[in-house]
Each structure stands twice: as structure tokens, then as C-alpha cells.
Image (cartoon, grey):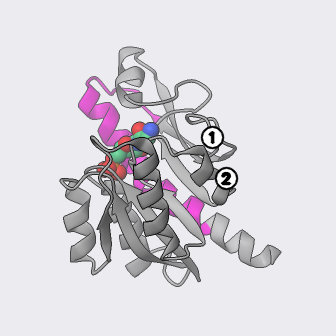
């Protein structure tokens, strides 16, 4: 059973999908969440995490010197000795020292093909380009922005989607299913390898 810490910055719908998979879906018996960490005190996902009885922590990033933020983040996370750190709508770039401390142990979901679009506003990008097919990527986090090794990609059919809302809705439906499936594959494969 893997011990994970989830990082969020806002709504936390991917985090909630993971928590649901743990209580009654594909992640049941596969992993548990020791803490949900947010860099924003007003992240709506914090309340959601608490309703699932999950411990939460806030390490404020805004207005804090990067070195100080990273020191506090490390201290907070290390206290839980996680096997994996799962980014779920975490909107900050992790410090390279932190990434090096958890090689192939930090996983992210990105709402586009990471080779086609990196960084923020991926659904806006897909909508503005009127893509008929888009992708959700799950990847390991390295020191770049959405440049880490790809673990899996899922297609999102955008045919008939006519607004940004449609693009997001279709993409999120895939994200919520796909992230848990990928996490299960990673965690179980690693158990077999050991
Ligand atoms: C999700 O679409 C996630 O893939 C994306 O932010 C949204 C967070 O929603 N992440 C990124 O763009 C990272 N570059 P959520 O807080 O409801 O999970």
C-alpha cells in the first residue's frame, strides 16, 4: 500500500476523484493519502479533503521568498515520508532540489499532450485551436515545465464541442477516470518489481 501526498492549488476535482477511487474504486487497497497540501489557503479542495477525513496542510507561496517556501514545503512533506507526491492542479513549479529528492516519485496530470502544449491554460489552447481530438497526459515531474517522462496519454474526443466549457467538461471527465487508472498501474507495477 503506497503512502501518497497530494498537492493542490484550487478546486481539487482531480484530488476528489482520487479520494473517491480510494474509498470505492480502482485505488481501494492500493494507496492512502496521508496529507493534502495546498500553496493557497483559499483552495476549495482543502474543504473537500477534510470532508473525506484527510489531513490538510497549507504552505503559502504568495509573497513568500522562494527559498523559504521550498524549505517549508520540504519540511511539511518530509514529515509524512510519502512514497509518491501526486500533483492535482498544483499551479507552481517545483524547486529543482525538491524534484531531485523525489526522483520518479512526483507525478502530474496535464490537460493536453505535453509535447504540444506546456504550462497553463491548456483547455483554452485546445479550444482556440478548435482541436477535434485532445489528450490528457500523466507524467513524472522533472526539473522542466511539463517535460518529464510520459507515463500515459488518454484521448479526449472534442468533436461537437463548441465552447471552452465543453472542452473543459469533456477533458475533466477523462482526467478524473484516467488519473486513478494510471496511478494504480504505477503503484502496482512497482510492487511487482520490488
Ligand atoms: C486540471 O484540469 C488539471 O489537469 C490542470 O488544472 C486543473 C485543476 O483542476 N493542471 C494543470 O494545468 C497543470 N499544468 P482541479 O483542481 O479541479 O483538479
- Disc 1 + disc 2, Cβ < 8 Å: yes
**Residue nearer the viewer, 143 or 31:** 143
Q: Is residue 76 magenta?
A: no
Mark 1 secondary-structure assignment? loop
Label 1 – label 2 distance at C-alpha = 8 Å
According to the picture, the residue beneath numbered tag 2 turns out to be 100
Residue 34: which numbered mark, if any? Answer: none
Q: Is residue 160 magenta?
A: yes
Q: From the viewer's perspective, tell me whether residue 66 is left or right of residue 106.
A: left
Residue 167 vertical position relative to residue 150 in the rendered view, above or below: above
Q: The magenta stretch spans which residues?
A: 157-184
Q: Position of residue 87 (x, y in %)?
A: 47, 54
Q: Residue at x 46, y 23 (%)?
A: 132
Residue 143: which numbered mark, if any? Answer: 1
Q: From the viewer's perspective, tell me whether residue 98 is left or right of residue 72.
A: right
Q: Position of residue 25 (x, y in %)?
A: 44, 75
Residue 57 vertical position relative to residue 34 in the rendered view, above or below: above
Mark 2 secondary-structure assignment? helix
Amino acid at each position: 500500500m503506497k503512502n501518497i501526498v497530494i498537492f493542490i492549488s484550487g478546486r481539487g476535482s482531480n484530488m476528489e476523484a482520487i479520494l473517491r477511487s480510494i474509498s470505492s474504486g480502482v485505488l481501494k487497497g492500493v494507496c492512502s493519502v496521508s496529507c493534502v497540501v495546498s500553496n493557497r489557503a483559499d483552495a476549495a479542495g482543502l474543504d473537500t479533503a477534510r470532508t473525506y477525513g484527510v489531513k490538510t496542510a497549507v504552505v503559502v507561496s504568495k509573497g513568500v521568498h522562494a527559498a523559504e517556501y521550498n524549505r517549508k514545503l520540504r519540511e511539511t512533506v518530509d514529515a509524512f515520508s510519502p512514497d509518491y507526491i501526486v500533483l492535482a492542479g498544483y499551479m507552481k513549479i517545483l524547486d529543482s532540489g525538491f524534484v531531485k529528492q523525489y526522483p520518479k516519485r512526483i507525478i502530474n496530470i496535464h490537460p493536453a499532450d505535453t509535447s504540444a502544449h506546456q504550462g497553463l491554460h491548456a483547455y483554452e489552447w485546445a479550444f482556440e485551436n478548435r482541436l477535434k481530438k485532445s489528450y490528457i497526459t500523466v507524467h513524472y515531474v522533472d526539473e522542466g515545465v511539463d517535460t518529464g517522462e510520459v507515463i500515459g496519454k488518454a484521448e479526449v474526443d472534442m468533436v461537437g464541442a463548441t465552447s471552452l466549457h465543453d472542452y473543459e467538461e469533456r477533458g475533466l471527465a477523462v482526467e478524473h477516470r484516467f488519473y486513478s487508472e494510471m496511478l494504480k498501474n504505477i503503484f502496482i507495477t512497482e510492487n511487482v518489481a520490488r
